[in-house]
Image (spheres, grey):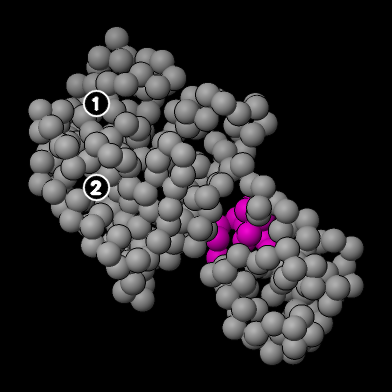
Amino acid sequence: MAEDYGNLTSPRARFAADLAEHRKAARMTQAVLASRMRCHESLISHVEKGRRSPTADFAQEADKVFGLDGHFTALFNGISQSPALGWFARWVEEIEPRAVILHSWDPLLMPGLLQTADYARAIFSAGDSAHRVEERVAARIQRIKIFESPDPPAFLALIDEGVLHRPIGGSRVLAGQLRYLLELCEHPGITVQIVPVAAGCAAGMMSAFALARLRDGSEVVSADSVLAGEVTGDHAAVVRLRQRYDTIRANAQPKDVTQQAIKDAIRTWAS
């Protein structure tokens, strides 16, 4: 059975669910399907569980085996061309839903997991068409649903103080975002800490990044930049970013001071 990815709106999650559904309807085991598709049985398992992305050849073979007119090929094209997720698809679809603990650092923007639709729309509107913007906004605000799962992760978000005073989308949008952030601060699984501008925080100025510890004990990181992004479980990268996170957090304000800073910013932008 494919892993639960919420409402299965993403092409990758749909591919996983449909592959398992068609295989079972045809009364095939994963071994039989692998033999007919000329691939290893473990690949069928990984694709059905959302752990591996299908290739174009894999999609074509699935269509051939099940006698479908391009169904899986179309889903593959949706995965490869998805404007909603892009390179971040692996993190959103594979890592976040399986995480026990998530840590994030954001020096310029609100964390994606905690953004309102209006705030996200203001970010995405810089260079995309209206249709693509709405797809990306929908994908972003869906991510908060991981906290509605039976076993949600703990989320520790570090945010630079300057984010509270950067009017993304204008004063109304930022005020709404800050009110939403204050509400989320009360969630038992979410911890938000502001890193004051006075701290300097040179360690965090290079980029935003996130770390995840999965249920099997493994750790994965993602790092963003203007030109590219990366999701990796490389041990050296994980250690380096975990050390950087600890350095940044050492300068972060406690919960009560953070919430007061958010309230003060709300009064500024709502006036």
On whether residue 9 falls in the magenta region, the answer is: yes
| Residue 132 x/y as whole percent | 64, 34
Foreground pick, 15 / 126: 126
Amino acid under label 2? Thr
| Residue 265 x/y as whole percent | 24, 21
Q: Is residue 55 left or right of residue 199?
A: right
The residue that disc 2 covers is: 191
Foreground pick, 192 / 131: 131
Disc assigned to residue 231: none
Q: Is residue 25 left or right of residue 121?
A: right
* 2 vs 1, front mark: 1
Q: Which residues are magenta?
A: 4-15
Foreground pick, 117 / 110: 110
Distance of label 2 from label 1 (alpha carbons): 18 Å
- Of label 2 and label 1, which has the lower sequence position? 1
Where, by quadrant of the figure, is residue 185 drawn?
Answer: top left
Where, by quadrant of the figure, is residue 147 drawn?
Answer: bottom left
Amino acid under label 1? Gly
**Is residue 61 visible in the rendered structure shown here?**
yes
| Residue 96 x/y as whole percent | 43, 58
Instruction: Bin the neighbour count of mark 2 within 10 Å (Cα to Cα): few under 14, some 14-19, many 20 and up.
Output: some
**Is residue 96 visible in the rendered structure shown here?**
no
Disc assigned to residue 162: 1
Q: Secondary structure at mark 2?
A: strand
